[in-house]
Image (cartoon, rainbow, N blue to C red):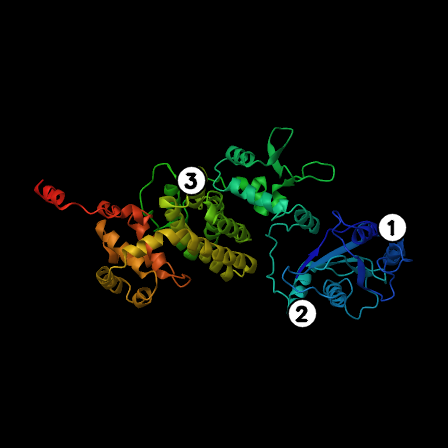
Amino acid sequence: MIPRVHKMGTRTIGLIRYLYGPGTHEEHTDPRLVAAWDSLVPDPGRNSKATYGDLQRLLDQPVEALPKSRRPTEHVWHLSVRAAPEDPILSDEQWGDIARRMVAATGIAPDGDTAACRWAAVRHADDHIHIIATTVREDGRRPRRHNEAKRSQAEAHLIEADYGLRRLNTGDGTAAQRPTSAERHKATRHQRERTPREELRESVRHAAAGAQSEEEFFDRLTHTGLLVKRRVAPSGDLLGYTVALPDDRNKNGEPVFYSGSKLAPDLSLPRVRERWTLPAKSPSDEGVSPEQPALPPVTGPAYARRRATTATWQALLLIEHGDDGTAAARIAAAGEVLDALAETSAAHTRRELRDAAFAFERASRSHVRTARGHDHALRQAAHDLAHSGPALGSGEDGATTAMLIDTAFFLVTAAANWHARKHHAQQAEAARQAAEHLRVAYEIAAAQPMSVLHQRGRSLSLQRRQAAVLRQALPEIAEQVLAEPGWPALAATLADTRAAGHNPAHLLAEATRHRELDSATSVSDVLVWRLRRLAHLPADPAASLPRRAATTQPVPKAANNASRRR
Protein backbone atom coordinates (compact mmCIF):
# COMPACT_ATOMS: atom_id res chain seq x y z
CA MET A 1 0.00 0.00 0.00
CA ILE A 2 1.46 3.31 -1.09
CA PRO A 3 0.49 6.57 0.65
CA ARG A 4 1.50 9.86 -0.93
CA VAL A 5 1.25 13.30 0.67
CA HIS A 6 0.62 15.83 -2.10
CA LYS A 7 1.57 19.49 -2.26
CA MET A 8 -0.59 21.77 -0.10
CA GLY A 9 -3.35 23.61 -1.97
CA THR A 10 -5.19 26.90 -1.67
CA ARG A 11 -8.68 26.09 -3.06
CA THR A 12 -10.78 23.37 -1.46
CA ILE A 13 -13.41 23.54 -4.20
CA GLY A 14 -10.80 22.92 -6.91
CA LEU A 15 -9.66 19.62 -5.41
CA ILE A 16 -13.26 18.53 -4.73
CA ARG A 17 -14.19 19.14 -8.38
CA TYR A 18 -11.21 17.10 -9.53
CA LEU A 19 -12.00 14.18 -7.20
CA TYR A 20 -15.67 14.05 -8.22
CA GLY A 21 -15.03 14.92 -11.84
CA PRO A 22 -14.26 12.59 -14.76
CA GLY A 23 -10.50 12.89 -14.33
CA THR A 24 -7.91 14.10 -16.79
CA HIS A 25 -8.66 11.26 -19.20
CA GLU A 26 -12.09 10.02 -18.08
CA GLU A 27 -10.45 7.60 -15.65
CA HIS A 28 -12.64 8.46 -12.63
CA THR A 29 -15.64 6.14 -12.23
CA ASP A 30 -18.49 6.34 -9.71
CA PRO A 31 -16.89 8.89 -7.30
CA ARG A 32 -18.34 8.74 -3.76
CA LEU A 33 -17.49 9.37 -0.12
CA VAL A 34 -16.27 6.34 1.83
CA ALA A 35 -15.58 8.19 5.11
CA ALA A 36 -15.50 11.68 6.62
CA TRP A 37 -15.03 13.47 9.94
CA ASP A 38 -18.84 13.31 10.39
CA SER A 39 -21.06 10.45 9.21
CA LEU A 40 -23.79 12.95 8.22
CA VAL A 41 -21.62 14.81 5.68
CA PRO A 42 -23.55 15.10 2.36
CA ASP A 43 -22.03 13.11 -0.50
CA PRO A 44 -22.27 14.83 -3.92
CA GLY A 45 -21.65 11.47 -5.53
CA ARG A 46 -24.67 9.78 -3.96
CA ASN A 47 -27.02 12.61 -2.96
CA SER A 48 -28.43 14.48 -5.94
CA LYS A 49 -29.31 17.44 -3.70
CA ALA A 50 -25.78 17.78 -2.34
CA THR A 51 -23.35 20.01 -4.26
CA TYR A 52 -19.60 20.39 -4.38
CA GLY A 53 -20.07 23.77 -2.76
CA ASP A 54 -21.91 22.21 0.19
CA LEU A 55 -18.99 19.92 0.90
CA GLN A 56 -16.48 22.74 0.41
CA ARG A 57 -18.27 25.08 2.85
CA LEU A 58 -18.42 22.39 5.53
CA LEU A 59 -14.72 21.57 5.15
CA ASP A 60 -13.71 25.24 5.17
CA GLN A 61 -15.82 26.34 8.16
CA PRO A 62 -12.93 26.22 10.70
CA VAL A 63 -10.77 28.20 8.26
CA GLU A 64 -13.44 30.82 7.64
CA ALA A 65 -14.03 31.16 11.38
CA LEU A 66 -10.53 32.60 11.84
CA PRO A 67 -9.87 36.32 11.38
CA LYS A 68 -8.62 37.00 7.85
CA SER A 69 -5.18 37.91 9.16
CA ARG A 70 -4.79 34.43 10.66
CA ARG A 71 -6.19 32.32 7.82
CA PRO A 72 -3.47 30.24 6.15
CA THR A 73 -3.24 30.66 2.39
CA GLU A 74 -2.30 27.01 1.78
CA HIS A 75 -4.78 25.13 3.91
CA VAL A 76 -5.89 22.22 1.65
CA TRP A 77 -4.23 18.93 2.63
CA HIS A 78 -4.30 16.00 0.19
CA LEU A 79 -3.26 12.36 0.71
CA SER A 80 -3.74 9.53 -1.77
CA VAL A 81 -3.52 5.89 -0.72
CA ARG A 82 -3.04 3.22 -3.39
CA ALA A 83 -3.13 -0.57 -3.17
CA ALA A 84 -0.61 -2.76 -5.00
CA PRO A 85 -1.77 -4.10 -8.42
CA GLU A 86 -1.95 -7.69 -7.12
CA ASP A 87 -3.98 -6.80 -4.01
CA PRO A 88 -7.66 -7.80 -3.86
CA ILE A 89 -10.28 -5.10 -4.46
CA LEU A 90 -11.28 -3.64 -1.09
CA SER A 91 -14.80 -2.63 -0.15
CA ASP A 92 -15.90 0.95 0.58
CA GLU A 93 -16.09 0.05 4.29
CA GLN A 94 -12.50 -1.21 4.24
CA TRP A 95 -11.27 1.90 2.46
CA GLY A 96 -13.17 4.01 4.97
CA ASP A 97 -11.38 2.28 7.83
CA ILE A 98 -8.03 2.83 6.05
CA ALA A 99 -8.84 6.54 5.65
CA ARG A 100 -9.60 6.92 9.38
CA ARG A 101 -6.34 5.21 10.27
CA MET A 102 -4.39 7.48 7.91
CA VAL A 103 -5.78 10.79 9.21
CA ALA A 104 -5.11 9.58 12.76
CA ALA A 105 -1.53 8.52 11.97
CA THR A 106 -0.64 11.76 10.16
CA GLY A 107 -2.00 14.05 12.89
CA ILE A 108 -4.93 15.41 10.86
CA ALA A 109 -7.53 13.74 13.10
CA PRO A 110 -6.00 11.75 15.99
CA ASP A 111 -8.23 9.11 17.56
CA GLY A 112 -10.56 10.58 20.20
CA ASP A 113 -9.73 14.19 19.31
CA THR A 114 -13.11 15.97 19.03
CA ALA A 115 -11.51 19.23 17.89
CA ALA A 116 -9.48 17.73 15.02
CA CYS A 117 -9.39 18.88 11.41
CA ARG A 118 -12.26 18.22 9.06
CA TRP A 119 -11.60 15.67 6.33
CA ALA A 120 -13.30 13.50 3.71
CA ALA A 121 -12.19 10.40 1.77
CA VAL A 122 -13.30 10.05 -1.87
CA ARG A 123 -13.09 6.87 -3.91
CA HIS A 124 -13.28 7.03 -7.71
CA ALA A 125 -11.34 3.86 -8.63
CA ASP A 126 -10.98 0.30 -7.39
CA ASP A 127 -7.38 0.58 -6.22
CA HIS A 128 -7.09 3.91 -4.35
CA ILE A 129 -8.73 6.71 -2.39
CA HIS A 130 -8.02 10.42 -1.94
CA ILE A 131 -8.29 12.15 1.42
CA ILE A 132 -8.93 15.90 1.48
CA ALA A 133 -8.65 17.92 4.69
CA THR A 134 -8.42 21.54 5.77
CA THR A 135 -5.54 22.22 8.13
CA VAL A 136 -7.30 24.35 10.71
CA ARG A 137 -8.71 22.45 13.66
CA GLU A 138 -12.16 23.05 15.16
CA ASP A 139 -10.44 24.90 18.02
CA GLY A 140 -8.61 27.21 15.58
CA ARG A 141 -5.18 25.65 16.08
CA ARG A 142 -3.04 23.96 13.41
CA PRO A 143 -2.55 20.17 13.43
CA ARG A 144 0.76 18.54 14.32
CA ARG A 145 1.89 17.02 11.03
CA HIS A 146 5.58 16.52 11.73
CA ASN A 147 7.01 13.60 9.67
CA GLU A 148 3.55 12.92 8.22
CA ALA A 149 4.96 11.11 5.17
CA LYS A 150 6.95 8.65 7.29
CA ARG A 151 4.06 8.16 9.67
CA SER A 152 1.69 7.43 6.79
CA GLN A 153 4.14 4.84 5.45
CA ALA A 154 4.45 3.22 8.87
CA GLU A 155 0.67 3.00 9.14
CA ALA A 156 0.49 1.56 5.62
CA HIS A 157 2.74 -1.31 6.71
CA LEU A 158 0.39 -2.05 9.61
CA ILE A 159 -2.61 -1.94 7.27
CA GLU A 160 -0.89 -4.36 4.88
CA ALA A 161 -0.40 -6.83 7.72
CA ASP A 162 -3.96 -6.44 9.06
CA TYR A 163 -5.60 -6.86 5.64
CA GLY A 164 -3.22 -9.49 4.27
CA LEU A 165 -2.04 -7.22 1.47
CA ARG A 166 1.29 -7.27 -0.33
CA ARG A 167 4.04 -6.05 2.00
CA LEU A 168 5.81 -3.18 0.26
CA ASN A 169 9.26 -2.04 1.30
CA THR A 170 9.78 1.37 2.86
CA GLY A 171 11.12 3.98 0.45
CA ASP A 172 13.98 6.36 1.11
CA GLY A 173 13.12 9.17 -1.30
CA THR A 174 15.50 8.04 -4.06
CA ALA A 175 12.94 6.23 -6.23
CA ALA A 176 11.86 7.57 -9.59
CA GLN A 177 8.50 9.32 -9.66
CA ARG A 178 5.71 6.83 -10.27
CA PRO A 179 3.37 7.31 -13.23
CA THR A 180 0.14 9.07 -12.28
CA SER A 181 -3.28 7.46 -12.61
CA ALA A 182 -3.94 9.60 -15.67
CA GLU A 183 -0.70 8.43 -17.29
CA ARG A 184 -1.53 4.78 -16.64
CA HIS A 185 -5.06 5.12 -18.03
CA LYS A 186 -3.73 6.94 -21.08
CA ALA A 187 -1.21 4.16 -21.72
CA THR A 188 -3.99 1.56 -21.44
CA ARG A 189 -6.17 3.45 -23.92
CA HIS A 190 -3.30 3.68 -26.40
CA GLN A 191 -2.36 0.03 -25.79
CA ARG A 192 1.11 0.87 -24.54
CA GLU A 193 2.96 -1.71 -22.47
CA ARG A 194 4.49 1.09 -20.36
CA THR A 195 3.58 4.70 -19.74
CA PRO A 196 5.44 7.41 -21.71
CA ARG A 197 7.23 8.41 -18.49
CA GLU A 198 8.61 4.88 -18.11
CA GLU A 199 9.50 4.56 -21.81
CA LEU A 200 11.35 7.86 -21.69
CA ARG A 201 13.20 6.90 -18.52
CA GLU A 202 14.40 3.70 -20.18
CA SER A 203 15.47 5.52 -23.37
CA VAL A 204 17.34 8.26 -21.49
CA ARG A 205 19.11 5.68 -19.32
CA HIS A 206 20.21 3.82 -22.45
CA ALA A 207 21.51 7.09 -23.93
CA ALA A 208 23.44 7.88 -20.75
CA ALA A 209 24.88 4.37 -20.42
CA GLY A 210 28.62 4.72 -20.95
CA ALA A 211 28.31 8.20 -22.50
CA GLN A 212 31.60 10.03 -22.03
CA SER A 213 30.58 13.60 -22.83
CA GLU A 214 27.61 15.92 -22.95
CA GLU A 215 27.78 15.95 -26.75
CA GLU A 216 27.68 12.15 -26.95
CA PHE A 217 24.76 12.00 -24.51
CA PHE A 218 22.62 14.39 -26.54
CA ASP A 219 23.62 12.79 -29.85
CA ARG A 220 22.45 9.41 -28.57
CA LEU A 221 19.24 10.94 -27.21
CA THR A 222 18.46 12.40 -30.63
CA HIS A 223 19.29 9.16 -32.45
CA THR A 224 16.73 7.29 -30.36
CA GLY A 225 14.01 9.31 -32.09
CA LEU A 226 13.00 11.31 -29.00
CA LEU A 227 12.05 14.97 -29.16
CA VAL A 228 14.71 16.85 -27.19
CA LYS A 229 14.66 20.43 -25.89
CA ARG A 230 17.63 22.05 -24.19
CA ARG A 231 17.20 24.75 -21.53
CA VAL A 232 19.86 27.41 -22.06
CA ALA A 233 20.71 30.34 -19.75
CA PRO A 234 21.15 33.89 -21.15
CA SER A 235 24.89 33.32 -20.76
CA GLY A 236 24.68 30.39 -23.16
CA ASP A 237 25.27 27.75 -20.48
CA LEU A 238 23.16 24.61 -20.74
CA LEU A 239 20.95 24.29 -17.64
CA GLY A 240 18.85 21.21 -18.39
CA TYR A 241 16.83 19.30 -20.92
CA THR A 242 13.39 17.83 -21.56
CA VAL A 243 12.35 14.90 -23.72
CA ALA A 244 9.10 13.64 -25.25
CA LEU A 245 7.86 10.73 -27.33
CA PRO A 246 6.81 11.91 -30.82
CA ASP A 247 3.43 10.15 -30.52
CA ASP A 248 2.59 11.20 -26.94
CA ARG A 249 0.42 14.32 -27.22
CA ASN A 250 -1.81 16.31 -24.91
CA LYS A 251 -5.40 17.35 -25.69
CA ASN A 252 -4.07 20.29 -27.74
CA GLY A 253 -1.96 18.00 -29.90
CA GLU A 254 1.33 19.16 -28.36
CA PRO A 255 4.13 16.76 -27.30
CA VAL A 256 4.23 16.00 -23.56
CA PHE A 257 7.74 16.83 -22.35
CA TYR A 258 9.40 15.54 -19.18
CA SER A 259 12.57 16.92 -17.62
CA GLY A 260 15.31 14.47 -16.73
CA SER A 261 14.74 14.98 -13.00
CA LYS A 262 11.05 14.08 -13.43
CA LEU A 263 12.06 10.77 -15.00
CA ALA A 264 14.53 9.78 -12.25
CA PRO A 265 16.65 11.63 -9.68
CA ASP A 266 19.90 10.60 -11.38
CA LEU A 267 18.81 11.69 -14.86
CA SER A 268 18.88 15.44 -14.24
CA LEU A 269 21.62 17.09 -16.29
CA PRO A 270 23.89 17.85 -13.28
CA ARG A 271 23.63 14.22 -12.12
CA VAL A 272 24.30 12.86 -15.60
CA ARG A 273 27.36 15.12 -15.84
CA GLU A 274 28.75 13.52 -12.68
CA ARG A 275 29.24 10.32 -14.63
CA TRP A 276 31.93 11.96 -16.75
CA THR A 277 34.23 12.54 -13.75
CA LEU A 278 37.72 11.35 -14.55
CA PRO A 279 38.79 8.14 -12.76
CA ALA A 280 40.75 8.48 -9.55
CA LYS A 281 42.71 5.93 -7.60
CA SER A 282 40.65 4.42 -4.78
CA PRO A 283 42.05 2.92 -1.58
CA SER A 284 39.78 -0.06 -2.25
CA ASP A 285 41.53 -0.60 -5.59
CA GLU A 286 44.80 -1.45 -3.84
CA GLY A 287 45.89 -4.98 -4.56
CA VAL A 288 43.41 -5.44 -7.39
CA SER A 289 45.37 -5.74 -10.57
CA PRO A 290 43.86 -6.10 -14.01
CA GLU A 291 43.74 -9.66 -15.23
CA GLN A 292 45.04 -8.73 -18.66
CA PRO A 293 46.96 -5.79 -20.13
CA ALA A 294 45.35 -2.74 -21.66
CA LEU A 295 43.27 -3.85 -24.60
CA PRO A 296 42.95 -2.23 -28.03
CA PRO A 297 39.72 -0.51 -29.09
CA VAL A 298 36.65 -2.73 -29.31
CA THR A 299 36.13 -4.23 -32.77
CA GLY A 300 32.83 -6.09 -32.37
CA PRO A 301 30.00 -7.18 -30.07
CA ALA A 302 31.73 -10.38 -28.91
CA TYR A 303 34.93 -8.54 -27.95
CA ALA A 304 32.93 -5.85 -26.13
CA ARG A 305 31.07 -8.52 -24.16
CA ARG A 306 34.26 -10.30 -23.19
CA ARG A 307 35.82 -7.06 -21.94
CA ALA A 308 32.61 -6.18 -20.09
CA THR A 309 32.73 -9.60 -18.43
CA THR A 310 36.26 -8.88 -17.20
CA ALA A 311 35.22 -5.49 -15.79
CA THR A 312 32.17 -7.04 -14.12
CA TRP A 313 34.26 -9.83 -12.61
CA GLN A 314 36.73 -7.35 -11.12
CA ALA A 315 33.91 -5.19 -9.71
CA LEU A 316 32.48 -8.10 -7.73
CA LEU A 317 35.16 -8.16 -5.06
CA LEU A 318 35.19 -4.38 -4.78
CA ILE A 319 31.44 -4.24 -4.10
CA GLU A 320 31.67 -6.96 -1.48
CA HIS A 321 34.77 -5.65 0.31
CA GLY A 322 35.25 -2.01 -0.74
CA ASP A 323 34.14 1.14 1.06
CA ASP A 324 30.57 2.37 0.70
CA GLY A 325 31.29 5.16 -1.78
CA THR A 326 33.12 2.98 -4.28
CA ALA A 327 30.57 0.16 -3.86
CA ALA A 328 27.72 2.59 -4.59
CA ALA A 329 29.58 3.91 -7.66
CA ARG A 330 30.09 0.43 -9.07
CA ILE A 331 26.48 -0.55 -8.44
CA ALA A 332 25.32 2.57 -10.30
CA ALA A 333 27.71 1.75 -13.17
CA ALA A 334 26.47 -1.85 -13.20
CA GLY A 335 23.09 -0.39 -14.13
CA GLU A 336 24.72 1.27 -17.14
CA VAL A 337 26.20 -2.07 -18.23
CA LEU A 338 22.77 -3.71 -18.03
CA ASP A 339 21.22 -0.81 -19.96
CA ALA A 340 23.83 -1.09 -22.72
CA LEU A 341 23.55 -4.89 -22.81
CA ALA A 342 19.76 -4.71 -23.14
CA GLU A 343 20.03 -2.11 -25.89
CA THR A 344 22.38 -4.26 -27.99
CA SER A 345 20.98 -7.71 -27.21
CA ALA A 346 19.66 -10.20 -29.76
CA ALA A 347 15.92 -10.60 -30.16
CA HIS A 348 15.56 -13.84 -28.18
CA THR A 349 17.15 -12.39 -25.01
CA ARG A 350 16.05 -8.76 -25.38
CA ARG A 351 12.84 -8.95 -23.34
CA GLU A 352 14.41 -10.46 -20.23
CA LEU A 353 17.48 -8.23 -20.41
CA ARG A 354 15.31 -5.12 -20.76
CA ASP A 355 13.25 -6.22 -17.77
CA ALA A 356 16.44 -6.86 -15.78
CA ALA A 357 17.79 -3.39 -16.57
CA PHE A 358 14.38 -1.81 -15.86
CA ALA A 359 14.20 -3.52 -12.44
CA PHE A 360 17.82 -2.77 -11.51
CA GLU A 361 17.28 0.93 -12.17
CA ARG A 362 15.81 1.21 -8.65
CA ALA A 363 18.84 -0.56 -7.16
CA SER A 364 21.30 1.87 -8.78
CA ARG A 365 20.38 4.75 -6.42
CA SER A 366 20.57 5.20 -2.66
CA HIS A 367 21.51 7.90 -0.18
CA VAL A 368 25.10 6.58 -0.10
CA ARG A 369 27.14 9.14 -2.05
CA THR A 370 28.86 7.55 -5.01
CA ALA A 371 32.61 8.02 -5.35
CA ARG A 372 32.56 8.92 -9.03
CA GLY A 373 35.69 8.08 -10.96
CA HIS A 374 36.02 4.65 -9.37
CA ASP A 375 33.36 3.29 -11.71
CA HIS A 376 35.49 3.93 -14.81
CA ALA A 377 36.01 0.30 -15.85
CA LEU A 378 32.31 -0.55 -15.79
CA ARG A 379 31.33 2.71 -17.50
CA GLN A 380 33.93 2.05 -20.20
CA ALA A 381 32.44 -1.43 -20.59
CA ALA A 382 28.98 0.12 -21.05
CA HIS A 383 30.43 2.53 -23.61
CA ASP A 384 32.07 -0.33 -25.52
CA LEU A 385 28.84 -2.34 -25.55
CA ALA A 386 26.82 0.62 -26.81
CA HIS A 387 29.30 1.38 -29.60
CA SER A 388 30.00 -2.20 -30.68
CA GLY A 389 26.59 -2.56 -32.28
CA PRO A 390 23.88 -5.19 -31.85
CA ALA A 391 25.00 -8.76 -31.27
CA LEU A 392 23.87 -11.85 -33.12
CA GLY A 393 22.13 -14.50 -31.10
CA SER A 394 24.52 -17.28 -32.10
CA GLY A 395 28.22 -18.01 -32.53
CA GLU A 396 30.77 -16.05 -30.52
CA ASP A 397 28.32 -13.15 -30.06
CA GLY A 398 25.71 -15.38 -28.47
CA ALA A 399 28.20 -17.30 -26.34
CA THR A 400 29.90 -14.16 -24.99
CA THR A 401 26.44 -12.79 -24.20
CA ALA A 402 25.81 -15.87 -22.04
CA MET A 403 29.24 -15.38 -20.44
CA LEU A 404 28.47 -11.75 -19.59
CA ILE A 405 24.97 -12.48 -18.30
CA ASP A 406 26.37 -15.20 -16.04
CA THR A 407 28.89 -12.78 -14.50
CA ALA A 408 26.35 -9.94 -14.33
CA PHE A 409 24.03 -12.21 -12.34
CA PHE A 410 26.64 -12.45 -9.57
CA LEU A 411 27.32 -8.71 -9.67
CA VAL A 412 23.60 -7.97 -9.28
CA THR A 413 23.38 -10.53 -6.46
CA ALA A 414 26.31 -8.83 -4.73
CA ALA A 415 24.47 -5.51 -5.10
CA ALA A 416 21.34 -7.04 -3.51
CA ASN A 417 23.40 -8.30 -0.58
CA TRP A 418 25.12 -4.92 -0.14
CA HIS A 419 21.81 -3.07 -0.13
CA ALA A 420 20.36 -5.58 2.34
CA ARG A 421 23.27 -4.98 4.73
CA LYS A 422 22.59 -1.23 4.48
CA HIS A 423 18.85 -1.82 5.09
CA HIS A 424 17.95 -0.43 1.65
CA ALA A 425 14.86 -2.62 1.33
CA GLN A 426 13.52 -1.34 -1.98
CA GLN A 427 16.91 -1.43 -3.67
CA ALA A 428 17.66 -4.94 -2.41
CA GLU A 429 14.30 -6.22 -3.70
CA ALA A 430 14.83 -4.52 -7.07
CA ALA A 431 18.25 -6.16 -7.44
CA ARG A 432 16.75 -9.56 -6.62
CA GLN A 433 14.10 -9.07 -9.30
CA ALA A 434 16.81 -8.10 -11.80
CA ALA A 435 18.75 -11.25 -10.88
CA GLU A 436 15.75 -13.43 -11.68
CA HIS A 437 15.36 -11.83 -15.11
CA LEU A 438 19.07 -12.38 -15.73
CA ARG A 439 18.71 -16.02 -14.72
CA VAL A 440 16.02 -16.52 -17.37
CA ALA A 441 18.02 -14.57 -19.98
CA TYR A 442 21.07 -16.74 -19.26
CA GLU A 443 19.14 -19.97 -19.82
CA ILE A 444 18.04 -18.66 -23.23
CA ALA A 445 21.48 -17.39 -24.28
CA ALA A 446 23.45 -20.39 -22.98
CA ALA A 447 21.28 -23.15 -24.44
CA GLN A 448 23.17 -23.55 -27.73
CA PRO A 449 26.81 -23.23 -26.59
CA MET A 450 26.26 -25.40 -23.51
CA SER A 451 24.62 -28.06 -25.67
CA VAL A 452 27.74 -28.21 -27.86
CA LEU A 453 30.01 -28.50 -24.83
CA HIS A 454 27.79 -31.18 -23.32
CA GLN A 455 28.12 -33.31 -26.45
CA ARG A 456 31.90 -32.90 -26.45
CA GLY A 457 32.15 -33.89 -22.81
CA ARG A 458 30.13 -37.10 -22.94
CA SER A 459 33.24 -39.32 -23.16
CA LEU A 460 33.47 -41.29 -19.91
CA SER A 461 37.25 -41.50 -20.12
CA LEU A 462 37.47 -37.70 -20.49
CA GLN A 463 35.11 -37.25 -17.54
CA ARG A 464 37.21 -39.58 -15.35
CA ARG A 465 40.40 -37.64 -16.10
CA GLN A 466 38.79 -34.26 -15.43
CA ALA A 467 36.99 -35.52 -12.29
CA ALA A 468 40.41 -36.16 -10.76
CA VAL A 469 41.41 -32.56 -11.54
CA LEU A 470 38.19 -31.25 -10.02
CA ARG A 471 38.59 -33.28 -6.82
CA GLN A 472 42.16 -32.05 -6.46
CA ALA A 473 41.32 -28.37 -6.96
CA LEU A 474 37.88 -28.10 -5.29
CA PRO A 475 37.43 -31.05 -2.91
CA GLU A 476 34.65 -29.27 -0.96
CA ILE A 477 32.23 -29.00 -3.88
CA ALA A 478 33.57 -31.63 -6.29
CA GLU A 479 30.87 -34.23 -5.65
CA GLN A 480 28.12 -31.63 -6.00
CA VAL A 481 29.51 -30.52 -9.36
CA LEU A 482 29.96 -34.10 -10.60
CA ALA A 483 26.27 -34.77 -9.92
CA GLU A 484 25.07 -31.75 -11.92
CA PRO A 485 23.70 -32.12 -15.49
CA GLY A 486 26.27 -29.56 -16.64
CA TRP A 487 29.29 -31.61 -15.57
CA PRO A 488 30.06 -32.94 -19.11
CA ALA A 489 30.29 -29.33 -20.38
CA LEU A 490 32.70 -28.45 -17.56
CA ALA A 491 34.77 -31.57 -18.29
CA ALA A 492 35.08 -30.51 -21.93
CA THR A 493 36.12 -26.99 -20.89
CA LEU A 494 38.77 -28.35 -18.48
CA ALA A 495 40.18 -30.38 -21.37
CA ASP A 496 40.19 -27.23 -23.54
CA THR A 497 42.14 -25.27 -20.90
CA ARG A 498 44.82 -27.98 -20.74
CA ALA A 499 45.03 -28.11 -24.53
CA ALA A 500 45.56 -24.33 -24.51
CA GLY A 501 48.59 -24.75 -22.22
CA HIS A 502 46.99 -23.88 -18.84
CA ASN A 503 46.92 -25.77 -15.56
CA PRO A 504 43.21 -26.60 -15.04
CA ALA A 505 43.56 -27.01 -11.28
CA HIS A 506 45.11 -23.56 -10.92
CA LEU A 507 42.38 -21.99 -13.06
CA LEU A 508 39.66 -23.67 -10.99
CA ALA A 509 41.15 -22.22 -7.84
CA GLU A 510 41.30 -18.78 -9.42
CA ALA A 511 37.72 -19.06 -10.68
CA THR A 512 36.36 -19.64 -7.18
CA ARG A 513 38.64 -17.33 -5.17
CA HIS A 514 36.64 -14.62 -3.33
CA ARG A 515 33.58 -15.29 -5.48
CA GLU A 516 30.52 -16.95 -3.94
CA LEU A 517 28.73 -19.79 -5.74
CA ASP A 518 25.81 -20.37 -3.37
CA SER A 519 23.33 -18.43 -5.54
CA ALA A 520 24.27 -20.36 -8.70
CA THR A 521 21.65 -22.70 -10.10
CA SER A 522 24.43 -24.69 -11.76
CA VAL A 523 27.95 -24.38 -10.37
CA SER A 524 29.33 -26.26 -13.39
CA ASP A 525 27.83 -23.68 -15.76
CA VAL A 526 29.39 -20.85 -13.77
CA LEU A 527 32.79 -22.53 -13.81
CA VAL A 528 32.56 -23.14 -17.57
CA TRP A 529 32.31 -19.42 -18.32
CA ARG A 530 34.86 -18.36 -15.75
CA LEU A 531 37.40 -20.87 -17.08
CA ARG A 532 36.82 -19.95 -20.70
CA ARG A 533 37.33 -16.29 -19.86
CA LEU A 534 40.42 -16.83 -17.68
CA ALA A 535 42.02 -19.11 -20.27
CA HIS A 536 41.08 -16.75 -23.16
CA LEU A 537 39.26 -19.59 -24.89
CA PRO A 538 36.59 -18.82 -27.49
CA ALA A 539 33.26 -18.47 -25.72
CA ASP A 540 31.64 -20.35 -28.59
CA PRO A 541 32.81 -23.95 -28.05
CA ALA A 542 32.29 -24.80 -31.71
CA ALA A 543 35.17 -22.46 -32.54
CA SER A 544 37.59 -24.53 -30.44
CA LEU A 545 36.75 -27.88 -32.05
CA PRO A 546 39.71 -29.49 -33.86
CA ARG A 547 39.44 -28.91 -37.59
CA ARG A 548 39.19 -32.67 -38.33
CA ALA A 549 36.08 -32.91 -36.10
CA ALA A 550 34.22 -30.38 -38.21
CA THR A 551 33.89 -32.74 -41.19
CA THR A 552 31.54 -35.68 -41.43
CA GLN A 553 33.45 -37.36 -44.30
CA PRO A 554 36.04 -40.04 -43.40
CA VAL A 555 39.59 -39.51 -44.67
CA PRO A 556 40.45 -42.08 -47.39
CA LYS A 557 43.08 -44.60 -46.33
CA ALA A 558 45.36 -43.87 -49.29
CA ALA A 559 45.31 -40.17 -48.56
CA ASN A 560 46.05 -40.91 -44.94
CA ASN A 561 49.13 -42.95 -45.86
CA ALA A 562 50.33 -40.23 -48.21
CA SER A 563 49.95 -37.72 -45.44
CA ARG A 564 52.12 -39.83 -43.11
CA ARG A 565 54.81 -40.18 -45.81
CA ARG A 566 54.90 -36.39 -46.26
Q: Give how far across and how far down residue 286 sits, in percent.
A: 36, 50
Which one is closest to the eye, mark 1 or mark 3? 3
Left or right for 452, reference 92: left
How many residues crowd around disc 3 within 10 Å: few (fewer than 14), some, or many (20 or more)?
many
Q: CA distance from mark 3 to mark 2?
A: 49 Å
Q: CA distance from mark 1 to mark 3?
A: 64 Å
Disc 2 marks which amino acid?
Tyr
- Image quadrant in which the C terminus is located: top left
Q: Which residue is mark 2?
A: 163
Q: Which mark is residue 5?
A: none
Q: Which residue is mark 1?
A: 69
Disc 1 marks which amino acid?
Ser
Is 142 located above or below residue 257 in the figure? below
Is 391 located above or below residue 367 in the figure? above
Query: What residue occupies the far left of the structure in this picture?
Result: 565
Left or right for 84, reference 429: right
Is 316 located above or below residue 296 in the figure? below
Left or right for 91, reference 223: right
Q: Give how far across and how far down residue 353 sits, in percent.
A: 48, 50
Q: Which residue is mark 3?
A: 384
Left or right for 39, reference 220: right
